[in-house]
């Protein structure tokens, strides 16, 4: 039931996002020199990339689980560190490139969108397929998720309005490092 609620919230979120979109906030479009890619080639590359994600994802999960067992650590520690970090690398690369090109909205939208998709769509769809146990998670884990979202919200609407400054980014990074240290100490 909760999975269905998540999926419903996802649909509402997507509808609201498209309904409230005011268009691009960039001052002027940047002309880039790019070769025109044929549609059939683009479709083929997207399908190849998706196939690579499926196969690579399965290999990644299988080997991360084996690594956890070999090191004697819990699946939760591997999931929160190695798996989450590995699956977040594409978002990191996208955000770094977007930030370097001064596409701030793209960088932040990528992260927020990814989190909304992961929580509402992926978690919701997974829970519909089979109920998910949260027994391995504790109050600290959920608290860190909530705390980071609140910090992001505060940083967005304080200081330089609608900007996340370097020191705020450094503080978010420090919070992540502290959480990782906490996980390894707690074991």
Image: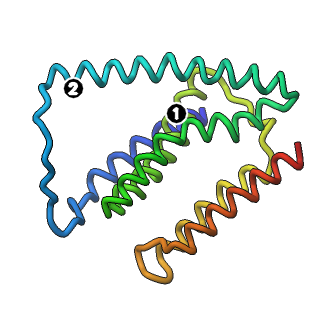
Residue 59 left/right relative to 106: right
Residue in the picture at 77% in, 41% down: 137
Q: Nearer the viewer, mark 2 or mark 1?
A: 2
Picture coordinates of residue 65, whole percent (x, y) = 73, 23
Residue in the picture at 43% in, 48% down: 113
In this rendering, the answer to whether 156 lies above or below 70 is: below
CA neighbours of label 2 inside 10 A, class few (<14), some (14 to 19), many (20+): few
Write down the residue under mark 1: 122
Picture coordinates of residue 31, whole percent (x, y) = 12, 55
Q: How is the image coloured?
A: rainbow
Element carrying mark 1: helix
Picture coordinates of residue 10, whole percent (x, y) = 44, 42
Question: Residue 42 got which mark?
Answer: 2
Q: Nearer the viewer, residue 61 or 117?
A: 61
Residue in the picture at 84% in, 46% down: 184
Question: Residue lying farthest bottom?
Answer: 159
In this rendering, the answer to whether 187 lies above or below 31 is: above
Residue 184 left/right relative to 170: right
Q: Residue 49 is drawn in which quadrant?
A: top left
Q: In 3D space, how far apart are the residues under numbered discs 2 and 1 (Cα atoms)?
A: 25 Å
Q: Residue 170 is drawn in which quadrant?
A: bottom right
């Amino acid at each position: 039931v909760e999975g269905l609620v998540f999926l419903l919230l996802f649909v509402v979120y997507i509808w609201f996002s498209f309904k409230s979109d005011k268009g691009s906030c960039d001052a002027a479009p940047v002309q880039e020199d790019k070769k025109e890619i044929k549609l059939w080639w683009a479709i083929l590359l997207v399908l190849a990339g998706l196939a690579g994600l499926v196969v690579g994802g399965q290999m990644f999960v299988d080997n991360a689980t084996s690594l956890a067992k070999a090191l004697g650590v819990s699946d939760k520690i591997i999931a929160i560190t190695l798996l989450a970090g590995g699956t977040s690398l594409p978002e990191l690369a996208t955000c770094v490139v977007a930030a370097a090109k001064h596409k701030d909205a793209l960088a932040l939208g990528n992260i927020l969108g990814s989190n909304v998709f992961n929580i509402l769509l992926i978690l919701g769809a997974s829970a519909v397929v089979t109920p998910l146990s949260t027994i391995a998670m504790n109050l600290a884990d959920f608290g860190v998720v909530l705390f980071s979202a609140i910090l992001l919200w505060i940083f967005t609407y304080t200081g330089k309005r609608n900007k996340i400054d370097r020191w705020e980014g450094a503080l978010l990074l420090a919070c992540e490092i502290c959480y990782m240290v906490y996980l390894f100490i707690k074991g």
